[in-house]
Amino acid sequence: MKITATIVGIVAGFLAAFVQAFMHVIPPPAYGICIACHMRDLVNWIVAHIYPIYGLSKGKLIIPGGPVSYYIPVLTVIGVLIGASFAARINNEFRWKTMRVAWQKPWVEFFWGIGFMISALLMGGCPIRTALKSAYLDITAIIGFFMIFIGVIIACELIKKIS
Amino acid sequence: MDYLPAIATLCLGFIFGYLGQRARMCFIGGMRDWWLVKDTYLLKGLFAFFISALIGFSIFHFLAPAIKTFPWFINGGNLFAAKWSKIGVSATPSFMLPVPGDPITWSYKIGAHLILAIIGGLGVGFISTFAGGCPFRQHVMAAEGSRSAILYIFGLIVGAILFHKIIAPFVKALLL
């Protein structure tokens, strides 16, 4: 069976709701799948355990991020990396490559990563969690979703102009 | 019990990563392809995700006790709580919501949340289009061996630390 994006969307959306309902991924609601937030939780957990001064506040160890990942951080990012590399290996799609476009060269992409993380955490999630929060009927997330769409349109017009 | 979220999200990430690599799933890419070349393959995935999550939340709202926060409405604000509790819907019990150390997702000021959503949404859309995909797609591309995507992930790590040390106190002083 050919896996299309529609099937992936259905499976992922239902599993995100399932994980929250039965696997206790709850204290921030709608936290089933998010790349930016879970990466943030993982990084903050590791850094706060290596350098405790990072997460120290009024003498208590407080890890910035979701309360789910206080004892053990959520590991979606690791899972995605393992799963995707597994799929790439068994289908012989793995090869080293570098993007040739000027704004997708590795060192430029590093600064895109920093900017993306900051703006995503300002909004409260990456596009995946924004869709999930919109499904959770959060008004700010729905507005953020439209703003993402407007940002995509602006960037598309800019790319058309400069390329 | 403390290990359950980590194991569950690890398995979920494995499934999502595997399927996403096969279908070249991307959330920003759906909007981008639709706007540039009117290709709706990825956009259908985005809407399927939204509708499936909505149905899943609605079903599990009646099955599981952990999801009683379902109609959220405003990020952290208890705007509709009193009104909706009369008809049996518990909206945002406040003990579930505070995120320690994350001041931005925990505030009663609704205007601040709207401003942050507008600024952050514009930034996310713009940067993701230029970087060539949403962070999920970047992780999949990193697993396929793209050097650009690997550097993007390092950028995410540095950005998270920068955000919590510099940006978050600044925004908190400015808005909240």
Image (cartoon, coloured by chain):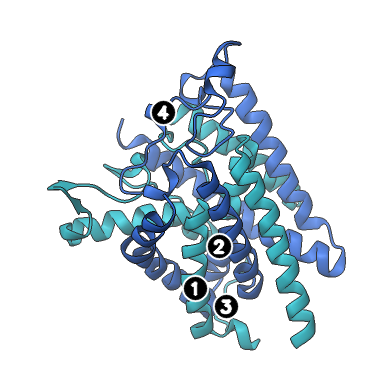
Tell me which amino acid carries mark 4. Ser
Q: Report which colour depicts chain A.
A: cyan
Q: Report which colour depicts chain B.
A: blue
Q: Is residue A51 above or below residue A132?
A: below
Image quadrant holding the C terminus of chain A, namely bottom right
Which element type, helix, strand or loop, lies under badge 2? helix
Q: Where is mark 2, residue-wise?
A: B135
**Residue B171 coordinates in the image, percent (x, y):** 41, 59
Tell me which amino acid carries mark 1. Tyr
Q: Where is mark 4, residue-wise?
A: B94
Q: Answer whether labels 4 and 1 touch (C-beta < 8 Å).
A: no
Q: Where is mark 3, residue-wise?
A: A95
Mark 3 vs mark 2, CA separation in Å: 20 Å
Tell me which amino acid carries mark 3. Arg
Residue B152's label in the rendered image is: 1
Which element type, helix, strand or loop, lies under badge 1? helix
Q: Tell me which residue sits at (42%, 72%) in the image.
A: B154
The one nearer the camera, A101 or B19, is A101
